[in-house]
Image (cartoon, grey):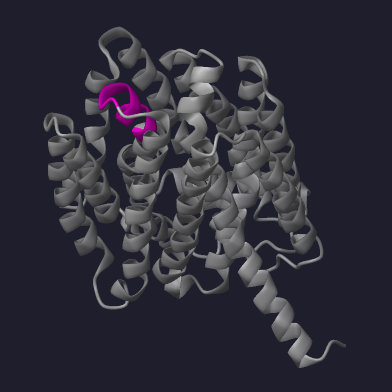
Amino acid sequence: MLPQSKIWRSSLLFIAVLYGVELLDEFIYGLFGAVLPTIKSELALTYTQVGLLFTLPGLIGVLGEPLIGLLGDTRHRRLLVVGGILATAIGLALIAGAQQYLPLLLAEGVMYLASGAYVNLSQATLIDRDPRRAENTMARWVLLGAIGVTIAPLLVTLILSVEGNWRTLFLGTAIVAGVFAGLLFKQRFDGHAGAAAAAGSLKQLGCNLLTALRSRPLIKWVILTELADFMLDKLLEVTGLYFHDVAGVSLPAASAVVTIATIAGLIGNFALVPLLEKVNGVRLLRVSAGVGLMAYVALLLIPFVWLKVALIAVINLSTAGWYVVLRAKCYAVLPGQSGVVVAVTSLANISSLCVPLLLGGIADAFGLSAAMWLLIIGPVALIWGVR
């Protein structure tokens, strides 16, 4: 029998690595967003092709993620998490070597599906450890992600400024992903209700999914989470392109703006951890949605670049708590069934995954400046949904 000190250290390492999974995932996300203008230029991509890089792989992920979520409520959760990280390492290596559009698209497809396994189930595992403090757990989770997404554009800006090769960053990150897989290989994922269930019980899990889909409170919070993403990931994905193609800044400067935006989000997430101990999460959503809406409208209308940079920082600061509160509300509806919640939220991704393609199509037809108005749906939905 292991000494109590070793058990405690093992548990602490397990929790640290699970939180680190979010840091890794958001670092990868920020890395791709920061180099996207450079990739678009090097490979001569259209806006529609850029939109497909997010939409088509995302649709592939949606087809697999509900099943991954259901399997995540069985004894196979560890296998799914470790396998997802290894697949991500392969995708990163493919991006590093991509010289044409199709390999890049393939890499994104691999990574979207893998993310549904290792990121969502790592998050669910942390929630299962203490369901009563889901918002606080999510606040720390998002804070680690904000650190990752902030570091990435800083590194890209540095590399581009010294005329370095951005591909080395993807290769290095692939190696780090392999280390994460090794650290989780022998850990026990047994905090969820179905930790001892075999894959043969999928019929019952399917019934649980259908029951969850009939839960009006769950569907409400899931839909609001997806619509809020218009002002979260969807905005960050095109921030660099907007400042380069519309505001007219250079490629290194566009990466720098992404860095400023992510730093503002990081500050907001740091403040969020103690704030949620004192402030009601839904009340925070109401106030921040109004601030985000006014700042975004001003961003699109005001012509001064320096003011646009300040406003994108305000937007990222004000939206810091959105995902935290909304996702926590989703888990709270079905305590102990985090895998089912992952499955339902994955199904909801179908609609939001069409946004990048729609945004790219509008940008090709009418210009990116006009297409950016589509993202205003995010704060408007929150103002209406949590009134």
Q: Residue at x 12, y 33 (%)?
A: 302
Quadrant where the N terminus lies?
Answer: bottom right
Task: Report the magenta stretch's main SS.
Answer: helix
- Residue 5 is situated, as x and y percent measured from the top left of the image, at 75, 90
Q: Residue at x 71, y 27 (%)?
A: 97
Magenta-span inclusion, residue 287: no
Image quarter of residue 356: top left
Left or right of residue 229, residue 58 in this image: right
Which residue is situated farthest in the top direction here?
Answer: 365
- Residue 253 is situated, as x and y percent measured from the top left of the image, at 37, 36
Which residue is situated farthest in the front direction here?
Answer: 162
Q: Nearer the viewer, residue 320 or 45?
A: 45
- Residue 344 is situated, as x and y percent measured from the top left of the image, at 49, 44
Image quarter of residue 113: top right
Image position of 232 with respect to 239: above or below: below
Image position of 219 with respect to 265: above or below: above
The answer to whether one can see residue 78 in this image is: no
Q: Where does the magenta region start and end? A: 239-248
Left or right of residue 211, residue 91 in this image: right
Image quarter of residue 329: bottom left
Q: Nearer the viewer, residue 172 or 147?
A: 172
Left or right of residue 163, residue 277 in this image: left
Q: Residue at x 70, y 50 (%)?
A: 177
Magenta-span inclusion, residue 247: yes
Q: Residue at x 63, y 42 (%)?
A: 169
- Residue 247 is situated, as x and y percent measured from the top left of the image, at 25, 27
